[in-house]
Image: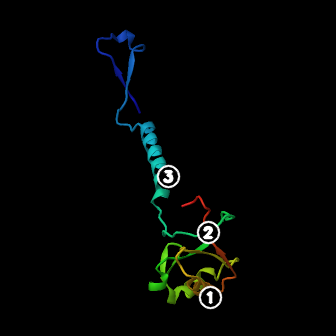
Amino acid sequence: MPKIAHSPGVTAGRVGRSRRVATSLAEINVVPLVDVMLVLLIIFMVTAPMLQRGVDVKLPQAVRAQQVTGERIEITVPAIYNQQKLLYIGKDQVPARVFQERIRQQIENRANKDVFLRGADSVTYQDLMEVIDMLKGAGVTNIGMVARLPGER
């Protein structure tokens, strides 16, 4: 509640006209706070997608490749698959010996049992066939091959 203070030097007869309200100046100014918070929100929204990094794979080119939308399971076969027998499910590195069980766990509750296979251009056809056999053994019904357009990186 604001306090009503009398101005010094005012006579008693003129008290009603020259009242001054003394308020506390300990209030937070909200407008600059909201401005700073909105700027920080915009900065984080712009920088967050730049921090996500996937596995670098040089994909083979396809002239008629189309963009795939929606939630999907991506399998990446890196160039070192032949030596280390490591695959990627999304961004998770998985040894080939447990790969089939991991895929089975991921697709067991899904309506569509589709996966998308990305392979480096230096991966042999035999290595891709091994991975496709493991996917079929895990219960995958459709396997999409991911390619890049000639102008893409």
- The disc, 3 or 2, on the residue closer to the chain's N-terminal end is 3
Q: Amino acid at mark 1?
A: Asp
Of the residues shown, which amino acid type is indicated by label 3? Met
Q: Position of residue 134 (x, y in %)?
A: 60, 87
Above or below 27: residue 110 = below
Check disc 2: other Cα within 10 Å, few if <14, some if 14-19, many if 20+. many
For disc 2, the marked residue is: 147
Measured from the top left, where is residue 81 in percent x and y? 49, 82
Give the mark, 1 or 2, whose residue is nearer the N terminus. Answer: 1
Q: Position of residue 67 (x, y in %)?
A: 66, 63
Instruction: Indicate the quadrant containing the C terminus: top left, top right, bottom left or bottom right.
Output: bottom right
Residue 133: give its label: 1
The reply to whether residue 82 is visible in this rendering is yes
Residue for badge 3: 45
* Foreground of the two, 35 or 103: 103
* Identity, as a three-letter code, of the amino acid under mark 2: Ala
Q: Nearer the viewer, mark 1 or mark 2?
A: 2
Q: Residue at x 55, y 81 (%)?
A: 124
What residue is drawn where x is 47% and y is 64%? 53
**Sequence order check, earlier mark of 1 and 3:** 3
On-image quarter of the N terminus: top left
* Residue displayed at 39% across by 18% down: 19
Residue 85 visible in image: no
Q: Secondary structure at mark 3?
A: helix
Cα gap from disc 3 to disc 2, whole angstroms: 29 Å
Q: Nearer the viewer, residue 144 or 12?
A: 144
Circles 3 and 2: CB distance less than 8 Å? no
Binning the other alpha carbons within 10 Å of mark 1 as few (below 14), some (14 to 19) or many (20 upward) gives few
Q: CA distance from mark 1 to mark 3?
A: 41 Å
